[in-house]
Amino acid sequence: MKIMFWIFITIVFYVYFGYPLLLIVISKFIKKPVKSEKIEPLVSIIITAYNEEKNIQEKLDNTLAIDYPKDKLEIIIASDGSTDRTNEIVREFEDKRVKLVYELTHKGKSSIQNKAVEKAKGEILVFSDATSMYKEDALKKLISNFNDEKVGCVTGKACYVNTEQSSTAEGESIYWRYELFLRKKESDIGILAMASGCFFAVRKNCFILIDSNTSDDFILPMNVVKKGFRVIYDTNAIAYDKVVVPASGLLKTKARTIGMDVKGLFLNRNLLNPFSHFAVAWSLISHKLLRWLIPFFLMGFFICNLFLLDYHFYQIFFVLQILFYLLAGLGYLFQKSGKKIKLLGIPFSFCVVNTAALIGTLKFLLGKASGKWEPIR
């Protein structure tokens, strides 16, 4: 039991601390710079929307204000069976660059994205959400990376704005900063294989039809890697979005996303083969696969600890676990009451994320669909 206890705790420590430390050390010796330079290919920005009448006007105004040649840019609103005024608002725009592609029924994000790409004329496809607002120079900086012929996908920096300053949003913001740190290091050493769904671009010849139960920001970057291209994270190409604040909304969104990503990785499991993709396999296992399995390791760690309570040393570990989960529970209670205690946001967010990972992985293992895409505002 002691051996299992230390195996579980070692894996958890490795995922959250060991892997980042290894990335820091490796990045000191290995760097793969990108030959970025100003280029202006034809670009298609595909904005997926489902009942976004409150945001679509602002999103289109923001996109049309981007610093990029007008004759080299088309903007496609991909409306997935919207039943509000989303389509009507888009049709009111007189700018010829704005086009509407829509489904009459709500089929899911992947379905409408596939349909939009069929209509897109751009050499570079940029995928965006309806609430993501770009800095004026964001597109130029994103596209400049495609000057390097080895680059097939570029993800921008998604900065999440914590408008309500709740403990949930605070914890999620900390988690996101940690996530972006990992992606930056992976990008620097050439092993990145994921993107931020609200702002990333791929070469059109690297696009594949997206399975309805997978995420575009994971399946497309992995396909880019399989084709022999690089995925780049550019911290200078910036987009702003809002944190999903309610804990229930965050849990639902993350569980669906993780379930889709697990399936995406399963469909591309050849990338986990260290004999053909050693570095990328290491990053995907450490950054994604093991992290999705953390709730199972935590449960194993807790159960093993129960069998070791005769030892004072292990009693301390048990008390620390109980205290951590109690703090997470307090974070939930304060969240419900509308109060914010910053430190409680960390254990609470940690538990929400790992509960979502548990739900998402179990759904995949049981062969259940992850659920239809529906943005939570």
Image (cartoon, rainbow, N blue to C red):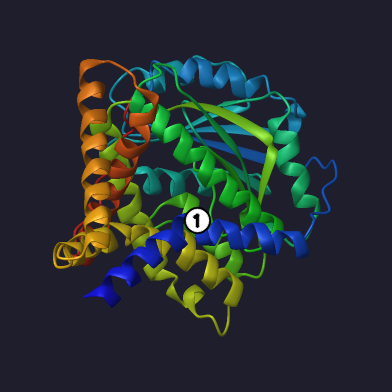
Rendered image quadrant of residue 104: top left
Q: Residue furthest bottom?
A: 275
Question: Few, some or many C-alpha atoms within 10 Å of disc 1 (few <14, some 14-19, many ≥20)?
Answer: few
Tell me how many marks there are. 1
List the single residue furthest toward the front.
Answer: 312
- Residue 250: x percent and y percent? 31, 35
Name which residue type carries label 1.
Phe
Q: Nearer the viewer, residue 164 or 23?
A: 23
**Image quadrant occupied by the C terminus:** top left
As rendered, which of 306 and 90 lies closer to the eye? 306
Vertical arrangement, residue 331 with respect to residue 202, above or below: above
Please provide percent x and percent y for residue 152.
67, 57
| Residue 107 appearing in the image | no
Q: Is residue 139 left or right of residue 104?
A: right
Residue drawn at point x = 29 percent, y = 77 percent: 3
* Residue 352 seen anywhere in this rendered image of the structure: yes
Q: Quadrant of residue 171?
A: top left
Per the image, label 1 sits on a secondary structure element best described as helix
Q: Position of residue 337 (x, y in %)?
A: 21, 16
Residue drawn at (53%, 54%), measured in percent from left and top?
194
Instruction: Give the residue at mark 1.
Output: 17
Q: Is residue 163 above or below residue 280?
A: above
Where 106 falls versus 61 (above or below)?
below
